[in-house]
Image: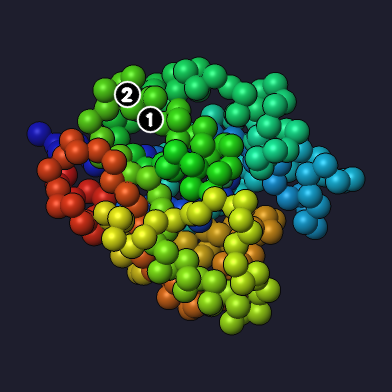
Amino acid sequence: MSIRQLTLMAVHAHPDDEATGTGGVLARYAAEGMRTVLVTCTDGRCGDGPGGVKPGDPGHDPEAVATARRAELEASCAILGVSDLEVLGYADSGMAGWSTNDVPGSFWTTPVEEAAGRLAELVDRYRPDVVVTYDANGFYGHPDHIQAHRITMAALERTGSPAKVYWTTMPHSAMAKFVEMAREAGMELPDEAPADVPEIGLPDEQITTWVDVSAYADRKFAALGAHASQEETMPFLSMGVERFAEVMGVETFVRVDEQVDAAVRETDLFAGLR
Ligand SMILES: [Zn+2]
């Protein structure tokens, strides 16, 4: 009798989010023999075009951007050892308040039940033991991240999946360190976040799960490098791999289910399952 392979499923909004938020755990658990399934919900068409051209500006071709970002996503998955990439292919809705939010076919305008039904098929097919997505605020308020959260929670409920469920987060201590290092690297940052930006991350004591991914920081860095067309990867890439490993060597999560008996404070997404 063979033992079933443990499976991690990460549900992300855009090409590049898999590297930013979960590149370490994807690489680590692939190396440990787990099956790693990445579901990317949108095509990233509202990302940067060649030469950094922004959506809505002359020369920004959303279809071409989506095609380029699909290739970047596949390169990132190869670096991280993702065993199964599933793309739902919804149109990127853009940042909160952009006119692209309401375009027919955008992920944001897609009924949660409809997209959750497609994700539920994948949950039934892969039967993940661990599922990772964003919190209800999509970590920082991006409509597609919020929608990814909603469809994931709906799909898990619909399928009755017994998976351990996690939301990505950042400890406030790490965010302070990140800002400090970004400044040292020459980035200009405001002293205080603007008042209209929702507070992101969590106080350290509210974080349940701290996973050491320092041995895979170089892979995570390389996966981010695969998405180099996107300006938002620059703060990471400009640090260089050594500084990056110092700041990004631990990935943090909040465990949101109580279905598996594991310690409240964990260092392994699969704690209690192996
Ligand atoms: Zn995103």
Locate residue 149, reporting x and y percent: 45, 35
Nearest the viewer among 232 and 201 is: 201
Find the residue positioned furthest to the right.
Answer: 58
Residue 138 sits above or below residue 153 on the image: below
Q: Secondary structure at mark 1?
A: helix
Residue 221 lies left or right of residue 123; in this view the side is right
- Which residue carries the number 1 mark? 153
Q: Residue at x 71, y 41 (%)?
A: 46
Nearest the viewer among 30 and 128 is: 128
Specify the quadrant of the image occupied by residue 267: bottom left
Residue 250 lies left or right of residue 258; in this view the side is right
Q: Residue at x 42, y 68 (%)?
A: 174
- Which residue carries the number 2 mark? 157
Q: Residue at x 47, y 62 (%)?
A: 220
Find the residue positioned furthest to the bottom.
Answer: 184
Total numbered labels: 2
Instruction: Kindly identify the amino acid type of the residue bearing the numbered disc 2.
Output: Glu
Locate residue 222, reporting x and y percent: 53, 63
Q: Are marks 2 and 1 in contact (CB under 8 Å)?
A: yes
